[in-house]
Amino acid sequence: MPIATKTIEGFAAQKEKSSLQPYKYEAHPLGNFDIEVEITHCGICHSDLHMINNDWKISKYPLLPGHEIIGNITQKGEKVTELNIGQRVGIGWQSNSCRKCEWCHQGEENLCLTQESTCVGRPGGFAKSLIVDHHFAFSIPENLKSENAAPLLCGGATVFSPLLQHGVDGTFRIGVFGIGGLGHLALQFAKAFGCEVFAFSSSMAKEKEAKELGATHYISTSDPSHLAKLKNSIDLILYTSSHIADFSQLMGLLRPKGKLCLLGVPENGKVNLPIVDFIDGRKTVCGSNIASPPVIQKMLEFAARHGIVAKTELFPMSEVNTALDKLKANQIHYRAVLCN
Ligand code: NAP
Ligand code: ZN
Ligand code: ZN
């Protein structure tokens, strides 16, 4: 019997830095462990824009972005037992891994060397539907609205994971550098952990909202004198900007044993720091990628319990280019979400 395939409609970039155009592709047949998800919402992460622009030199075209997906299961493979048809699920940046290596066995699939991403070399969520391995689909708590929860699947996971990795508790002073999609979620999570929260933004424009979201202090990085006053103040900085920063200045903000955790991946982003910045005060620079599947599920439950959701601007999927233009201009009110 021929295996049924399905034509999926979405929006793709045909070449580097181009606008997205309607695009159709033949999805692979549903495997035993796969689910088919009818997409209702998809957030636009800055990584989608980096991918469209080929900022990281890994993009292949046509490129159908989108990895902050929420939708309903319309079909499932024979071996899918934990999820049901009709159930609402979310899918983030990761959509596969080897399931055999030490990291996969420990439930840290995001560290697997052969992990696959939802929209790298395969079509993502700016589309009507998606076929994905159910291991990378997460149940969405009932009290989270899809339009505000979609950005948790990548943005929320990415800022929540380092709080667990670095043992953050209510005694911590957390800095969030860049108050965009990731940053505005980081403010909320850090507040829910009970931390003293420092928001660093390139202008004063976001002060009122940043404080409402959880910032104890708001600092505009446009005036270096503001940063100078905060030397030796912060335990952990989450760097969430899509733009390059003066990392030596950020190291100066850290208290002894403080950590600078790099999450943003600007084009040509490089960290060039004097060795003494690490030695004096035993400071650390580290990075973090998304979150493991168990941490993503835990993050969703934590967000539901603490009322943490993204502030979103909604766009019909057909207006994806308008949303991308606003994102490029740093004018999105925290997170653009496309709806079908
Ligand atoms: P976003 O919503 O566009 O926010 C980025 C923020 O960076 C902006 O709100 C702005 O903050 C600052 N910014 C942007 N352009 C700037 C400029 N020209 N000058 C100064 N500041 C500028 O992006 P996002 O979706 O939060 O993603 C942020 C970064 O994280 C991206 O590089 C993305 O690829 C990366 N990311 C990494 C992971 C991971 O696993 N590590 C996961 C998801 C995303 P202010 O207005 O407050 O200055
Ligand atoms: Zn993302
Ligand atoms: Zn693996």
Image (cartoon, helix red, strand yellow):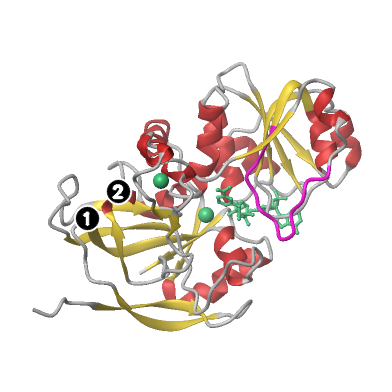
Q: Position of residue 330 (x, y in %)?
A: 67, 60
Residue at mark 1 to residue at mark 2: CA–CA distance: 8 Å
| Ligand 3 within 8 Å of the CB at mark 1 | no
Nearer-the-camera pick, 72 or 278 = 278
Q: Is residue 76 above or below residue 195?
A: below
Magenta-span inclusion, residue 252: no
Residue lying at the far top of the rendered structure: 171
Q: In the displayed image of the protein, which residue is found farthest to the left?
A: 1
Element under disc 2 = helix
The disc label shown at residue 127, or none: none
Q: Which mark is residue 33?
A: 1
Residue 332 makes an appearance in the image = yes
89 is higher (above) or lower (below) than 29: above
Q: 321 and 54: which one is in front?
A: 54
Quick check: marks 1 and 2 in contact, CB under 8 Å?
yes
Residue 124 percent across, percent down from the top left? 42, 66
Pointer 2 local density, CA inside 10 Å: few below 14, some 14–19, many at least 20: some
Residue sitting at x 84%, y 47%: 222
Residue 135 got which mark? 2
Which residue sits at x=42%, y=53%? Answer: 92
The C terminus sits in image quarter? bottom left
| Boundaries of the magenta span | 260-272
Q: Is residue 213 visible?
A: no
Q: Residues within 10 Å of mark 1 (few under 14, many from 20)?
A: some
Q: Does residue 262 belong to the magenta stretch?
A: yes
Instruction: Find residue 51 and report its image quarter.
Output: bottom right
1 or 2: tag closer to the N-terminus? 1
On the image, the x and y values in percent for residue 230 come to 83, 28
The residue under label 1 is which amino acid type? Phe
- Taking the spot 55% from the left edge, 40% from the top edge, the residue there is 159
* Number of disc labels: 2
